[in-house]
Every structure is written in structure tokens, then in C-alpha cells.
Image (tube, rainbow, N blue to C red):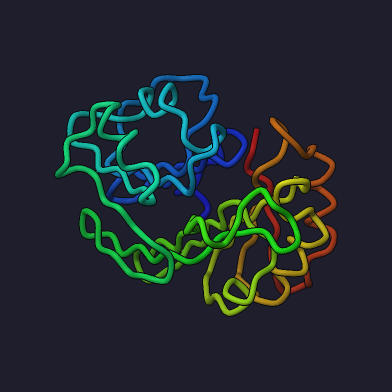
Amino acid sequence: MIEKIEVLNHSCVKFKFEKIIYVDPFKLKAEYKDADIILITHEHFDHYSEEDIEKVKKETTKIVITQDLKQRVKSYGFKEENIIVVKPNETYEVEKIKIETLPAYNVGKKFHPKENGWVGYIIENEGKKYYIAGDTDITEENQKIKCDIALVPVGGTYTMDYKEAATLVNIIKPQIAIPIHYGSIVGTAEDAENFLKLLSDEIKGIILMK
């Protein structure tokens, strides 16, 4: 499972399935131009970056967004048939890939209000579920998630810190947990290391960001 995942920077994750999927491309160091699907969790500049979308998209790329981004994506140049607008707590099929959405929001912080309808994603591939949390705290919804691999923010300030992220992962008990959302805007490599130390013994923690 792990060999199909790259954490390129911050919260940008690349999945190398039968379809190539990018989540929240940001500050990419290379041109890829191979995206079959781009998933955007929300509109903040470190998650929706047109400069970085340009580095991964091709003519047929499908982009999955929340409603508040639709006009920006159309103005940027995506054709209507390649835009998929999603809302939380729904299941979609994009390029024959099953994608679930769930709410991603702050509890007791103002940066990501629940009413904005921003999302995290669960991608299903070959019977395995990959959870990409988006910018979130521990919530009623994400404590109920069933997944095999969880990619969770650990940087704090705008999201969970590493202690909270470890608490969530220990509740949902994936096989593998991968820290993201650190090392660029907020959070450090030490946060990622500390996150791993707090995981239950049955959960394998892996750092993929280089």
C-alpha cells in the first residue's frame, strides 16, 4: 500500500493507483503533468494553488472541489465536464475510483468553520481505504471513520497538533498512519516524529515527506 503513496509537500499527497490522484498540490518542485484526478479539500492558498495545479494537470484531468471553488476553477480553465463539485457525507465515483467525503472543520478555532462545507476524502482502491483528513480537528464524524491508511495533519495552529492527531488515529485504528501538514506553513519534522511515538503498538507510523 505504501509504495503507491508519495507525500510531496505540506498536505500534497500523490496516489499512484491505476489512476494518478493528487490531493491539494502545493509548492511542488517538479512538473508532473500526469494527474487523472485532483482532489481539493478547501479553498485556502496552501490547498488550492493554481500554480501547482498547473504542474500536475493534463487536458483530461478531473478536478474534485467544494462548491465555493467552482467559479474559480472554471475561470482558471477547467471544462465543465471535468469539474466535480462535492459536499460532505457523500460518495462519488470519479474515473471508476470510489471517493467518499466527510466534513473537515475546526472545533474551538475559527479557521475552518463547519458551515463552509469543506472536506476530507476517503479513497478506495483494491479493497483498501485511504483517509486524507484535510484541515480538521478531532470531530464527531472523523472518530467514526473506518480506513486502512490515515494521512492526518500534525502541525497544529490551524489543525490538530501531533498529540491530537495521534489521539484520533488511536481511536480509528488504521493499519498505517502518515503525518502531513507540517514543515511548510506550520509544524516541524519533530512534530511528525513525536506523532509516531504516541501511536498504539498495533498501528504502524510512517513518515513519507522528504
At horizontal 78% and vertical 66% (from top left) the residue drawn is 199
Q: Choose between 160 and 7: the one closer to the eye.
A: 160
Query: In the image, 152: left or right of 67?
Result: right
Q: Quadrant of residue 203?
A: bottom right
The front one of 14 and 48 is: 48
Is 152 situated above or below 181?
below
Asked if residue 121 lies left or right of residue 72, the reply is: right
Q: How many marks?
A: 0
> In x, y percent, where is residue 113?
60, 56
Establish if 123 lies above or below 209. below
- Seen as rendered, the residue at the extreme bottom is 144
The residue under the point 23% across, 33% down is 78
Locate residue 202, reporting x and y percent: 72, 74
Residue drawn at x 78%, y 62% as measured from the top left? 164
Q: Position of residue 157 (x, y in %)?
A: 77, 46
Query: Farthest residue in the left direction?
Result: 81
Could you say which is closer to the camera, residue 25 or residue 41?
41
Q: Position of residue 43 (x, y in %)?
A: 48, 41
Name the residue: 68% across, 46% down. Answer: 207
Question: From the image, which quarter does the C terminus lie in?
Answer: top right
Q: Quadrant of residue 37?
A: top left
